[in-house]
Image (cartoon, grey):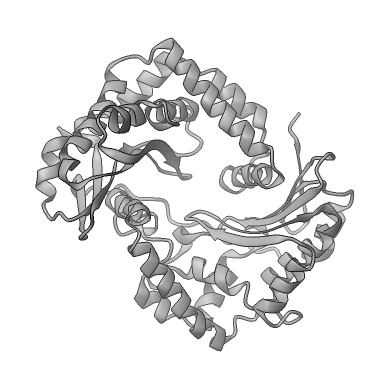
């Protein structure tokens, strides 16, 4: 039986709980099926900007200082994050203060003022966050890669948006986005840890009167192809690369084989990529591989920070490792190590109330089904070496490889030759 209990209020809002009686803390989190892929070109960045504005004051708590002060007064931590397919707001605190956490989170989401003067002030903060992002190639290269994969559609846009859309945002911009997507059918309240006995009653009292409204869905991702290499020219002492292929969406039948394929390639300090790229050849300080899936798209990729004078060797080595795993079955002992690695990291994630509810809410938001950790562990256990190679052969080939580069280069053709 799953550790999670799921209920649905009359207005369609879901409540997900995971009671851990031994815990001394509780995590209260509201996650919404609304992120940057729900934007238009004119509102790109508004999902993330909205996240900032929810902390700026409500009718009952008129300033950011008052909101923060209530959480500080119970020794709690609170924050939020925006992805392309979801946004979440959370408080972690001692279990005895659960109701304070619930009240603050709901007040922020229901009663934030979105004051025009505060919006204008926060524009400068967002622009500086953008500048930090653009000046951090290790982060920015991921955006260059997704733009290469998806082009000029929401999955290809940066979550932070563009400076012109941020500077042009008004209160009406926020209200248009929130009134469309911040509705009960897209909202899940999650509580994990020592939850208490009356979570559902508190949820009903705080959120049960929200009017049910059908929101529709965002446009599905469209196929996109415009070259195999994207180079962002930037003077630096280190180059950053992302090399990968399109993969599968979240609920694909081969998702667990794909996860172990990514783990063999780049999970941990004994993975193939870490061993070959860093330990044997000294080409990079950091290198890893993983798969990231959306509801209707995905990518298997590796990222590394490499010596600008040896970047050709680095790209060729990573490409060779990708092709090798498609050409040769993974040895039994290596597959078992990858399986144990993936299961172990997953179990560690579930040890904390925050990690547990994050797992549960992502399943609910993106897949709309009750999460069950045992299902994940069983899925990983069922993967064979033949499954891994079959998936690798399906995904990896010369013509499918895509490369994003940030560094002092301006010739994409030079890198295209390395992919064949």
Residue 57 appears anywhere in the view? no
| Up-down relation of residue 98 to residue 248 (above or below) | below
Q: For the C terminus, which image quadrant?
A: top left
The residue sitting at 24% across, 36% down in the picture is 400
The image quadrant that residue 61 belongs to is bottom right
Using the image as rendered, state which of residue 161 and residue 341 is in the foreground.
Answer: 341
Please state the horizontal and vertical placement of residue 294, each as a whole percent of the image.
46, 45
| Up-down relation of residue 91 to residue 167 (above or below) | above
The residue sitting at 56% across, 19% down in the picture is 381
Using the image as rendered, state which of residue 314 and residue 285 is in the foreground.
Answer: 285
Q: For the N terminus, which image quadrant?
A: top right
Please state the horizontal and vertical placement of residue 84, each as a whole percent of the image.
47, 55
Using the image as rendered, state which of residue 161 and residue 337 is in the foreground.
Answer: 337
Outermost residue toward the bottom in this view: 117
Give the total of numbered labels.
0
| Up-down relation of residue 392 to residue 22 (above or below) | above
| Up-down relation of residue 393 to residue 194 (above or below) | above
Please state the horizontal and vertical placement of residue 166, each as a whole percent of the image.
42, 76
Residue 59 in the figure: left or right of residue 143: right
Residue 352 appears anywhere in the view? yes
The residue sitting at 43% across, 56% down in the picture is 219
Outermost residue toward the right in this view: 197
The residue sitting at 28% across, 32% down in the picture is 277
The image quadrant that residue 34 belongs to is bottom right
Residue 182 in the figure: left or right of residue 169: right
Please state the horizontal and vertical placement of residue 366, each as a whole percent of the image.
56, 46
Residue 216 in the figure: left or right of residue 310: right
Residue 288 in the figure: left or right of residue 73: left
């Amino acid at each position: 039986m799953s550790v999670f209990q799921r209920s649905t209020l009359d207005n369609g809002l879901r409540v997900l709980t995971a009671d851990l009686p031994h815990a001394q803390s509780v995590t209260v989190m509201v996650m919404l099926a609304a992120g940057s892929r729900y934007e238009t070109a004119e509102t790109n960045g508004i999902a993330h900007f909205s996240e900032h504005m929810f902390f700026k004051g409500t009718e009952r708590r008129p300033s950011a200082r008052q909101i923060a002060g209530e959480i500080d007064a119970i020794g709690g931590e609170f924050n939020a994050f925006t992805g392309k397919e979801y946004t979440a707001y959370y408080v972690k605190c001692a279990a005895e203060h659960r109701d304070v956490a619930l009240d603050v989170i709901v007040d922020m989401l229901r009663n934030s003022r979105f004051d025009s003067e505060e919006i204008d002030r926060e524009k400068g903060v967002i622009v500086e966050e953008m500048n930090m992002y653009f000046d951090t190639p290790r982060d920015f290269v991921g955006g260059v890669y997704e733009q290469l994969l998806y082009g000029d559609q929401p999955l290809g846009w940066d979550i932070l948006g563009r400076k012109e859309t941020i500077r042009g945002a008004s209160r009406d911009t926020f209200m248009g986005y929130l009134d469309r997507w911040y509705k009960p059918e897209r909202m899940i309240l999650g509580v994990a840890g020592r939850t208490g006995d009356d979570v559902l009653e508190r949820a009903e009292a705080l959120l049960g009167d929200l009017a049910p409204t059908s929101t529709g869905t965002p446009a599905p991702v469209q196929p996109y192809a415009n070259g195999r290499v994207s180079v962002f020219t930037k003077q630096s002492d280190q180059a950053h690369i992302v090399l990968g292929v399109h993969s599968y969406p979240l609920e694909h039948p081969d998702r667990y084989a794909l996860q172990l394929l990514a783990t063999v390639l780049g999970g941990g300090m004994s993975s193939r990529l870490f061993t070959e790229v860093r330990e044997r050849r000294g080409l990079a300080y950091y290198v890893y591989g993983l798969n990231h899936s959306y509801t209707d798209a995905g990518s298997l990729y590796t990222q590394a920070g490499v010596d600008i004078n040896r970047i050709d060797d680095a790209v060729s080595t990573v490409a060779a490792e990708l092709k090798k795993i498609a050409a040769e079955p993974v040895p039994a002992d290596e597959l078992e190590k990858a399986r144990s690695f993936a299961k172990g990291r997953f179990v560690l994630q579930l040890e904390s109330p925050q990690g547990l509810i994050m797992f549960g809410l992502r399943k609910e938001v993106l897949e709309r089904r009750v999460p069950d950790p045992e299902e994940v562990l069983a899925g990983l256990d069922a993967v064979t070496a033949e499954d891994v190679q079959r998936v690798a052969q399906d995904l990896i080939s010369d013509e499918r490889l895509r490369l994003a580069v940030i560094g002092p280069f301006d010739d994409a053709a030079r890198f295209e030759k390395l992919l064949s």
